[in-house]
Image (cartoon, rainbow, N blue to C red):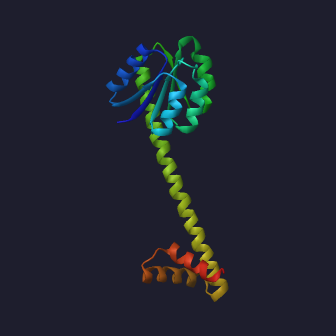
Amino acid sequence: MSRVLLASGSEKAGEVISALLKQMGIDTVVRTNNCEDIRKLIKNFDFELIILNAPLKDDFGKDLAIFLSEEINAVVFICKAQLYDEVSADLLPYGICTVANPLNKTVFEQSVKLILATQRNVINLRRENIDLKNKLEEVKIINRAKIVLVQSLKFTENQAHKHIEKTAMDRRQTKVQVARDILKTYEM
Protein backbone atom coordinates (compact mmCIF):
# COMPACT_ATOMS: atom_id res chain seq x y z
CA MET A 1 0.00 0.00 0.00
CA SER A 2 2.36 2.73 1.22
CA ARG A 3 5.99 3.25 2.12
CA VAL A 4 6.25 4.71 5.62
CA LEU A 5 9.28 6.04 7.45
CA LEU A 6 8.97 5.46 11.18
CA ALA A 7 11.40 7.15 13.55
CA SER A 8 11.18 6.25 17.22
CA GLY A 9 13.63 6.86 20.02
CA SER A 10 12.10 3.89 21.84
CA GLU A 11 12.65 0.47 20.27
CA LYS A 12 9.60 -0.99 22.01
CA ALA A 13 7.31 1.84 20.86
CA GLY A 14 8.73 1.49 17.35
CA GLU A 15 7.76 -2.20 17.34
CA VAL A 16 4.22 -1.41 18.54
CA ILE A 17 3.69 1.33 15.95
CA SER A 18 5.19 -0.86 13.22
CA ALA A 19 2.77 -3.66 14.12
CA LEU A 20 -0.18 -1.23 14.01
CA LEU A 21 0.88 -0.04 10.56
CA LYS A 22 1.18 -3.61 9.28
CA GLN A 23 -2.33 -4.36 10.63
CA MET A 24 -3.54 -1.40 8.57
CA GLY A 25 -2.09 -2.99 5.43
CA ILE A 26 1.04 -0.87 5.20
CA ASP A 27 3.62 -3.38 4.10
CA THR A 28 6.75 -1.25 3.83
CA VAL A 29 7.86 0.35 7.11
CA VAL A 30 11.41 1.68 7.21
CA ARG A 31 12.56 2.23 10.80
CA THR A 32 15.19 4.44 12.35
CA ASN A 33 15.71 6.23 15.64
CA ASN A 34 17.57 9.46 14.80
CA CYS A 35 17.37 12.65 12.75
CA GLU A 36 20.54 12.06 10.73
CA ASP A 37 19.23 8.76 9.33
CA ILE A 38 15.91 10.38 8.46
CA ARG A 39 17.61 13.11 6.42
CA LYS A 40 19.61 10.46 4.51
CA LEU A 41 16.59 8.25 3.91
CA ILE A 42 14.35 10.99 2.51
CA LYS A 43 17.06 11.86 -0.03
CA ASN A 44 17.21 8.29 -1.30
CA PHE A 45 13.61 7.06 -1.02
CA ASP A 46 10.09 8.37 -1.52
CA PHE A 47 7.82 8.02 1.48
CA GLU A 48 4.09 8.60 1.52
CA LEU A 49 4.12 9.13 5.27
CA ILE A 50 6.65 9.92 7.96
CA ILE A 51 5.88 9.13 11.58
CA LEU A 52 8.05 10.62 14.32
CA ASN A 53 7.66 9.17 17.80
CA ALA A 54 9.29 11.76 20.06
CA PRO A 55 11.80 11.99 21.49
CA LEU A 56 14.25 10.58 18.97
CA LYS A 57 17.72 9.41 20.03
CA ASP A 58 19.49 12.64 19.02
CA ASP A 59 16.72 15.28 19.22
CA PHE A 60 13.13 15.81 20.32
CA GLY A 61 12.16 15.93 16.66
CA LYS A 62 9.82 18.92 16.45
CA ASP A 63 12.12 21.00 14.22
CA LEU A 64 12.73 17.98 12.04
CA ALA A 65 8.96 17.48 11.70
CA ILE A 66 8.61 21.06 10.46
CA PHE A 67 11.45 20.53 7.97
CA LEU A 68 9.87 17.27 6.78
CA SER A 69 6.48 18.90 6.32
CA GLU A 70 8.05 21.07 3.61
CA GLU A 71 9.51 18.00 1.86
CA ILE A 72 6.53 15.69 2.25
CA ASN A 73 2.99 16.69 3.17
CA ALA A 74 2.29 13.66 5.33
CA VAL A 75 3.85 13.83 8.79
CA VAL A 76 2.48 12.37 12.02
CA PHE A 77 4.16 13.46 15.25
CA ILE A 78 3.65 11.36 18.37
CA CYS A 79 4.48 12.88 21.76
CA LYS A 80 3.66 12.39 25.43
CA ALA A 81 0.12 13.36 26.41
CA GLN A 82 1.48 16.04 28.79
CA LEU A 83 3.14 17.82 25.84
CA TYR A 84 0.33 17.29 23.34
CA ASP A 85 -1.38 20.71 23.56
CA GLU A 86 1.86 22.69 23.25
CA VAL A 87 3.37 20.53 20.50
CA SER A 88 0.12 20.33 18.56
CA ALA A 89 -0.25 24.12 18.63
CA ASP A 90 3.31 24.50 17.30
CA LEU A 91 2.97 21.90 14.54
CA LEU A 92 -0.60 22.45 13.34
CA PRO A 93 0.29 25.53 11.20
CA TYR A 94 2.63 23.27 9.22
CA GLY A 95 -0.08 20.69 8.54
CA ILE A 96 1.48 18.15 10.87
CA CYS A 97 -0.88 15.75 12.62
CA THR A 98 -0.01 15.36 16.30
CA VAL A 99 -1.08 12.28 18.26
CA ALA A 100 -0.80 11.83 22.03
CA ASN A 101 1.07 8.93 23.55
CA PRO A 102 0.01 6.46 24.94
CA LEU A 103 -1.57 5.72 21.57
CA ASN A 104 -5.24 5.11 21.16
CA LYS A 105 -5.30 2.53 18.35
CA THR A 106 -8.45 3.93 16.73
CA VAL A 107 -7.26 7.54 16.83
CA PHE A 108 -3.88 6.54 15.45
CA GLU A 109 -5.41 4.53 12.57
CA GLN A 110 -7.83 7.33 11.72
CA SER A 111 -5.01 9.88 11.77
CA VAL A 112 -2.81 7.79 9.49
CA LYS A 113 -5.66 7.09 7.05
CA LEU A 114 -6.65 10.76 6.97
CA ILE A 115 -3.09 11.94 6.41
CA LEU A 116 -2.54 9.40 3.60
CA ALA A 117 -5.83 10.38 1.92
CA THR A 118 -4.91 14.05 2.21
CA GLN A 119 -1.46 13.33 0.78
CA ARG A 120 -2.99 11.62 -2.26
CA ASN A 121 -5.36 14.54 -2.79
CA VAL A 122 -2.48 17.02 -2.60
CA ILE A 123 -0.49 15.00 -5.14
CA ASN A 124 -3.49 14.92 -7.50
CA LEU A 125 -4.03 18.66 -7.10
CA ARG A 126 -0.36 19.33 -7.86
CA ARG A 127 -0.61 17.24 -11.03
CA GLU A 128 -3.75 19.10 -12.08
CA ASN A 129 -2.03 22.41 -11.34
CA ILE A 130 0.94 21.46 -13.52
CA ASP A 131 -1.39 20.35 -16.33
CA LEU A 132 -3.34 23.61 -16.13
CA LYS A 133 -0.16 25.68 -16.17
CA ASN A 134 1.03 23.79 -19.26
CA LYS A 135 -2.31 24.30 -21.01
CA LEU A 136 -2.28 27.99 -20.14
CA GLU A 137 1.23 28.31 -21.54
CA GLU A 138 0.11 26.61 -24.76
CA VAL A 139 -2.86 28.96 -25.09
CA LYS A 140 -0.52 31.94 -24.62
CA ILE A 141 1.80 30.67 -27.37
CA ILE A 142 -1.09 30.05 -29.76
CA ASN A 143 -2.56 33.51 -29.05
CA ARG A 144 0.84 35.14 -29.61
CA ALA A 145 1.09 33.31 -32.95
CA LYS A 146 -2.37 34.56 -33.91
CA ILE A 147 -1.34 38.13 -33.09
CA VAL A 148 1.79 37.73 -35.24
CA LEU A 149 -0.32 36.46 -38.15
CA VAL A 150 -2.76 39.35 -37.73
CA GLN A 151 0.09 41.89 -37.69
CA SER A 152 2.34 40.32 -40.33
CA LEU A 153 -0.12 38.83 -42.82
CA LYS A 154 -3.13 41.03 -42.08
CA PHE A 155 -5.26 38.02 -41.14
CA THR A 156 -8.36 38.47 -39.04
CA GLU A 157 -8.24 36.65 -35.71
CA ASN A 158 -10.62 34.03 -37.08
CA GLN A 159 -8.46 33.54 -40.18
CA ALA A 160 -5.35 33.21 -38.00
CA HIS A 161 -7.11 30.64 -35.83
CA LYS A 162 -8.24 28.61 -38.87
CA HIS A 163 -4.77 28.87 -40.43
CA ILE A 164 -3.14 27.41 -37.29
CA GLU A 165 -5.74 24.61 -37.06
CA LYS A 166 -5.49 23.70 -40.76
CA THR A 167 -1.68 23.77 -40.73
CA ALA A 168 -1.66 21.54 -37.63
CA MET A 169 -3.96 19.02 -39.34
CA ASP A 170 -2.01 19.10 -42.63
CA ARG A 171 1.35 18.63 -40.90
CA ARG A 172 -0.03 16.23 -38.28
CA GLN A 173 1.30 18.47 -35.53
CA THR A 174 -0.27 20.07 -32.51
CA LYS A 175 -1.49 23.65 -32.70
CA VAL A 176 1.21 24.67 -30.24
CA GLN A 177 3.95 23.21 -32.48
CA VAL A 178 2.57 25.17 -35.43
CA ALA A 179 2.32 28.29 -33.28
CA ARG A 180 5.97 27.93 -32.23
CA ASP A 181 6.99 27.59 -35.88
CA ILE A 182 5.04 30.75 -36.74
CA LEU A 183 6.70 32.63 -33.89
CA LYS A 184 10.16 31.48 -35.03
CA THR A 185 9.42 32.59 -38.57
CA TYR A 186 7.85 35.99 -37.95
CA GLU A 187 9.38 37.18 -34.69
CA MET A 188 12.96 37.10 -35.97
Quadrant showing the N terminus: top left
Nearer to me, 43 or 18: 43
Q: Quadrant of residue 26?
A: top left
Q: Quadrant of residue 153?
A: bottom right
Q: Is residue 112 above or below residue 173?
A: above
At x 52% / y 84%, what residue is drawn?
163
Q: Is residue 47 above or below residue 24?
A: below
Q: Quadrant of residue 181?
A: bottom right
Nearer to me, 71 or 109: 71
Quadrant showing the C terminus: bottom right
Q: Is residue 89 above or below residue 115?
A: above
Percent x, y of residue 68 = 55, 33
Percent x, y of residue 159 = 56, 85
At x 62% / y 18%, what residue is drawn?
86
Q: Farthest residue to the top: give it.
A: 82
The reply, left or right, for residue 106 in relation to residue 94 is left
Percent x, y of residue 158 = 57, 82
Q: Is residue 147 above or below residue 73?
A: below
Confirm whether residue 93 shows in the render: yes
Percent x, y of residue 78 = 51, 20
Confirm whether residue 26 shows in the render: no
At x 44% / y 21%, what residue is drawn?
107
At x 62% / y 31%, what residue is drawn?
93
Nearer to me, 140 or 173: 173
